Amino acid sequence: MISAKIEKALNQQVLLEAESSQVYLTMASWAEVAGLSGVAAFLFRHSDEERMHMLKLVRFINERGGHAVIPALKQPAQKYKSIRELFQEVLTHEVFVSTEINNLVDICLKEKDYTTHNFLQWYVSEQIEEEALARKIMDKLKLIGDDKGGLYIFDRDLPAMATAD
Ligand code: OFO
């Protein structure tokens, strides 16, 4: 059984994962309209993954005697100035999510909730991977600069890069 404090903190994370899914879905749509089909495929998939992260939390909260609250979501920004701006936002967002996961782990330790602590370790590892991938993408985009040919190859190779890790 989880405490009210842990239930509240986990529900906060449900909201964050749902927002992540929504933001990546918005980015995917923007990329698709911009003709970047590889970037769009990557982001559609990323959005699905975030929904899976949310569902995992929902099931855990309910299984542990709490009540997972399905949150309302605000509309994300619909446009991006560039592909670099978009992925910088992905990286910043993932760093923020990692901080929130770490805070959650900290609350579990203070509450002596070792079951939830154990459950959250999956998210800790996942965040290491997501941050690393976002950094790798930003490094590639910096290399490409304004080279249109480079962007074409980046768009073509991105879906494979995401599944290679
Ligand atoms: Fe759920 O990992 Fe990204 O945000």
Image: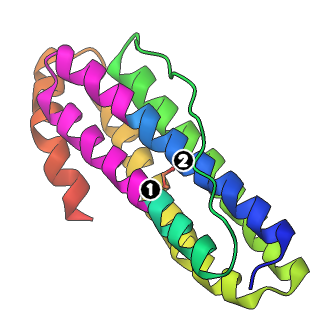
In magenta, the rendered stretch is 25-52
Q: Which of 123 and 6 is in front in this view?
A: 6
Image-quadrant location for residue 141: top left
Q: Residue 130, labelled with which disc? A: 1
Using the image as rendered, state which of residue 111 and residue 131 is in the foreground.
111
Q: Which amino acid does label 1 sit on?
A: Glu
Q: Is mark 2 within 8 Å of ligand 1?
A: yes
**Contact? badges 1 and 2 (CB < 8 Å):** yes
Please provide percent x and percent y for residue 90. Answer: 47, 37
Which of the two discs, 1 and 2, labels the residue nearer the N terminus?
Answer: 2
Percent position of residue 157, x then y: 12, 43
Which image quadrant: the N terminus?
A: bottom right
Whether 43 is among the magenta residues is: yes
Q: Residue 4 carries which label?
A: none
Residue positioned 25% across, 53% down in the render: 162
Q: Residue at x 20, y 60 (%)?
A: 163
| Residue at 76% across, 79% down | 2
Q: Residue 94 carries which label?
A: 2
Q: In this view, does 77 lie to the left or right of 30?
A: right
